[in-house]
Amino acid sequence: MSTPEELLDQLENKGYFIWDNFLESHTTKAISESWNEKIQNAELKKAGIGRADNYQVDAGERGDFIFWISKENTDEFVKTYLEKIEALITDLNRSFFLGIRDYECHFALYPVGTRYARHVDRHRSGSSRIVSFVFYLHENWHTEDGGHLCIYENDELVEKILPAASRLVVFLSEKEHEVLTTNRSRASITGWMLNK
């Protein structure tokens, strides 16, 4: 298991890192149960791509449904997760002077048979997104379940990441990445650290 210092070194050298057991398993399970309640209550909306005039919903490119998380109005388990993200932001700013001032995140659900095509999180028209992060919620995820996060460098696949429960993946928002087609319902918290 990597130390926090080693993870920061990986971000500097590779532009991403994988932090297993970011939260204790009982906390991850409680977040997952809270998330399932939102699914049951149909509090999700279909995610789109692009910004402003270029915004569109294209299920072929992006198949997830989302629910934005309010930092001020959420349960204690999600707050525990957000507090750890805020501590990570402090470490990133201290180590790399990234100027991160805020962050945003949402629950993301990929139904069976959906994916997110290759893309970057920094919009062409300009973006305050500096660092992206994804935290996975489902236990007992297997390779055949699909839904891997793939990270690319110079058009070459450099990492294929299994969406295992309690795993946090952090990467520079300029990195090209994709979510492969999932063979079972896939849930996560996806977010961005912002320099605004």
Image: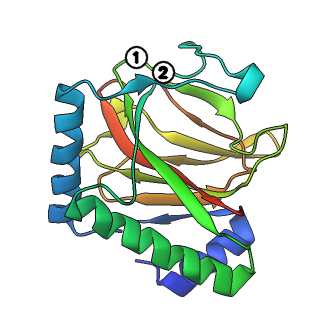
Asked if residue 129 is positioned above or below residue 154 in the image, the reply reads: below
Query: What residue is shown at x 66% (from left), y 87% (from top)?
Result: 94
Point out residue 112 in the picture as x, y percentages from the top left corner: 34, 20
Q: For the image shown, how many numbered marks are present on the structure?
A: 2
- Classify residue 60 as left or right of residue 31: right
Crowd around label 2: few <14 · some 14–19 · many ≥20 (10 Å): many
Q: Is residue 109 left or right of residue 28?
A: right
Q: Which of disc 1 and disc 2 is earlier in sequence?
A: 2
Residue marked by disc 1: 113
Q: Secondary structure at mark 2?
A: loop
Residue at point 72%, 27% (across, down): 52
Q: As drawn, is 93 to the left or to the right of 104?
A: right
Q: Nearer the viewer, residue 88 or 128?
A: 128
Mark sitting on residue 63: 2
Q: Which of the two discs, 2 and 1, sits closer to the camera?
A: 2
In the rendered view, tell whether residue 148 sits above or below residue 96: above
Q: Alpha carbon of mark 2 to alpha carbon of mark 1: how far? A: 8 Å
Position of residue 9 measured from the top left corner of the image (x, y, whole percent): 65, 79
Amino acid type, label 1: Gly
Residue at 70%, 65% (x, y): give it: 14
For residue 195, above or below residue 139:
below
Quarter of the figure with the N terminus: bottom left
